[in-house]
């Protein structure tokens, strides 16, 4: 049965999948964070270079740490898929 | 702080863990979510946090006063003051300079050597949304649909809750406040559905809307006289897809993020471009605004209860005011007038019955009519001015320049944006349900991999959401 919606667009709770317990939700988030840290290390490094000024006392350390992390991920090939997809789309656009 | 940024991802991860960590302590959890929401808003301009706070306190006090007032006449007066107060704030920030400009033009036309001063008022992001939430709250209390909240924290969080603060959906008090008052259930978090909705919203915004904006829409609407008729035609279709993906993408993310924090919002878009009439379109497009306008404007004006001509007048008034809600410009007025006229004409043809063509051919014809009408009205909605909108439509038929911007990439993105309307309407729910059957860690890995892929596919930087300006 399709999820029903009336004029105000109520979702049918029964159609929204199995809810998770908090422990499962936390495991899900942690697993996702690990994947993001590995394959998305490039954006994270870029983000660290734009930290606001009030973080100046720690930003040198954070920048160095994330840059080293990213270099390591590149060295083992974990960050490559991100670049392949990005370059592929740019080639498609021309 | 925009949703599709690493900054917001880090913010949300922090909010997720802390808010669920506070699940046993309801008041501290509400306080934390309120402070997080104000922090989110302060990322744009911290000064407007005081406006948000003032608006929330005003509506909290007004609702209590309405509830405690005895005679009906006093209640009505208080409601009038509350609604007028909200509209005055909205009017000042959104329309002051526009009205001064119109008055100065009028004075000039009458030959008066007088110019009223402009104030260059900065528009606080999301003001139309949180003002409408405030108005709906006091009206619902007046109508006794809900009771006024004694807790100021409930109202502060209701008005400022960050997933829907800056671009909706306009969540009704009756929907959100009972959820704010209840202890969140840590055994029933709709994570899988929320994550799928968020990813779909990110794809719509980062890939479809952003690329269409940069590859064709921004160019053709900047100066239509430089482009071929074909580019302008595809640009108009592309804008209809861009605004749908931009706005419904934001709504999807807002609904998904709220679900992960334990709150349910209603659907805001329901495949609007498969509508077979403009009446049906308004039941599927920006549902939270169209139902707001229906309940707090159209029905109080008399709705369809006072004969056919008053019904059409009410439809027209509602749509014109709906157009003006989007911004202080004649282009939005024209957009509202066109929709009001279409609704009035459909009402003349079909009366109170909803147009529901039985044959597939008639249904297809209805969809083509409604879609092309909407695309035409969006030319006025998007154009910088009325002159540019007319130039766009003129160049569409008269330009003999070569086609430059219509590429397979643009056509493909436009087709993808339209395809969202013709897949089964519960596709997202089915995907969320399928994802929810995987082990939790596997869900996390899969979602993060898709997130990385979407991020890698998107253009450099993120354009602000279109509806932030409203």
Image: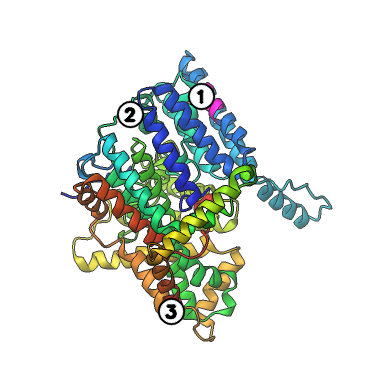
Q: Which residue is mark 2?
A: B184
Image location (x, y in percent) of residue B217: 50, 69
The foreground one among B443 and B156 is B443
Image location (x, y in percent) of residue B41: 55, 40
Q: Going by the image, does A91 lie left or right of B437?
A: right
The reply to whether the magenta stretch includes residue B217 is: no
- Checking the image for residue B374, the label placed there is none
Report helix, strand or loop for mark 1. helix
The foreground one among B308 and B57 is B57
Examine the rendering and report whether any part of residue B124 can be seen: no
- Checking the image for residue B60, the label placed there is 1
Q: Are marks 1 and 3 on the same chain?
A: yes
For discs 1 and 3, the disc positioned in front in the rendered view:
3
Q: Marks 2 and 1, Cα distance to the nearest angstrom? A: 23 Å
Dot 3: within a 10 Å radius of its alpha carbon, few (fewer than 14), some, or many (20 or more) residues? some
Q: Residue at x 34, y 61 (%)?
A: B273
Q: Which residue is mark 3?
A: B407
The foreground one among B314 and A76 is A76
Give the magenta range: B56-63
Q: Is residue B153 above or below residue B269?
A: above
Question: Numbered disc 3: what chain?
Answer: B
Q: Are marks 3 and 2 on the same chain?
A: yes
């Amino acid at each position: 049965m399709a999820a029903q919606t009336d004029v105000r667009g109520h979702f049918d709770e029964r159609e929204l999948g199995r809810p998770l317990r908090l422990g499962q939700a936390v495991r899900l988030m942690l697993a996702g964070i690990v994947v993001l840290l590995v394959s998305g290390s490039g954006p994270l490094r870029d983000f660290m270079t734009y930290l606001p000024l009030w973080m100046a006392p720690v930003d040198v350390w954070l920048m160095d740490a994330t840059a080293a992390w990213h270099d390591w991920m590149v060295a083992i090939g974990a960050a490559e898929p991100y670049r392949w997809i990005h370059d592929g789309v740019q080639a498609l656009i021309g | 702080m925009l949703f599709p940024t690493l900054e917001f991802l880090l913010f949300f991860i922090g909010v997720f863990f802390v808010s669920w960590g506070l699940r046993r302590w309801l008041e501290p959890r509400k306080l934390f979510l309120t402070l997080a929401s104000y922090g989110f808003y302060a990322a744009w301009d911290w000064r407007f946090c005081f406006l948000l706070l003032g608006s929330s306190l005003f509506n909290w006090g007004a609702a209590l006063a309405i509830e405690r007032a005895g005679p009906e006449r006093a209640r009505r007066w208080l409601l009038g003051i509350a609604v007028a107060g909200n509209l005055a704030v909205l009017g000042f920030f959104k329309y002051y300079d526009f009205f001064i400009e119109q008055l100065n033009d009028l004075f000039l036309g009458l030959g008066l050597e007088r110019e009223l001063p402009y104030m260059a008022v900065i528009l606080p992001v999301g003001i139309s949304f949180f003002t409408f939430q405030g108005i709906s709250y006091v009206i619902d209390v007046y109508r006794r649909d809900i009771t006024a909240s004694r807790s100021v924290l409930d109202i502060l969080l209701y008005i400022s809750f960050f997933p829907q603060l800056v671009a909706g959906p306009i969540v009704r008090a009756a929907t959100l406040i009972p959820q704010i008052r209840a202890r969140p259930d840590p055994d029933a978090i709709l994570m899988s559905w929320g994550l799928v909705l968020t990813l779909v919203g990110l794809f719509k915004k980062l890939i479809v809307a952003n690329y269409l904006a940069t590859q064709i829409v921004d160019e053709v609407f900047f100066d239509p006289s430089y482009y071929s008729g074909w580019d302008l035609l595809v640009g108009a279709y592309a804008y209809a897809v861009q605004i749908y993906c931009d706005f419904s993408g934001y709504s999807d993310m807002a609904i998904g993020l709220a679900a992960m924090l334990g709150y349910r919002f209603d659907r805001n878009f329901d495949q609007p471009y498969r509508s077979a009439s403009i009446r049906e379109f308004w039941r599927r497009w920006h549902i939270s605004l169209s139902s707001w306008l229906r309940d707090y404007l159209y029905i109080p004006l008399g709705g369809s209860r006072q004969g056919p001509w008053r019904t059409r007048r009410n439809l027209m008034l509602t749509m014109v005011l709906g157009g003006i809600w989007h911004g202080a410009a004649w282009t939005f007025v024209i957009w509202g007038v066109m929709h009001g006229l279409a609704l009035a004409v459909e009402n003349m043809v079909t009366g109170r019955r909803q147009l529901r063509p039985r044959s597939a051919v008639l249904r297809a014809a209805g969809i083509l009519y409604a879609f092309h009408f909407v695309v035409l009205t969006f030319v006025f909605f998007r154009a910088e001015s009325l002159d540019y909108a007319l130039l766009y439509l003129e160049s569409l038929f008269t330009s003999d320049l070569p086609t430059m911007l219509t590429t397979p990439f643009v056509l493909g993105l436009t087709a993808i944006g339209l395809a969202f309307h013709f897949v089964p309407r519960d596709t997202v729910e089915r995907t969320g349900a399928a994802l929810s059957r995987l082990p939790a860690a596997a869900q996390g890995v899969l979602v993060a991999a898709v997130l990385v892929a979407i991020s890698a596919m998107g253009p450099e930087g993120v354009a602000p959401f279109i509806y932030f300006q409203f």
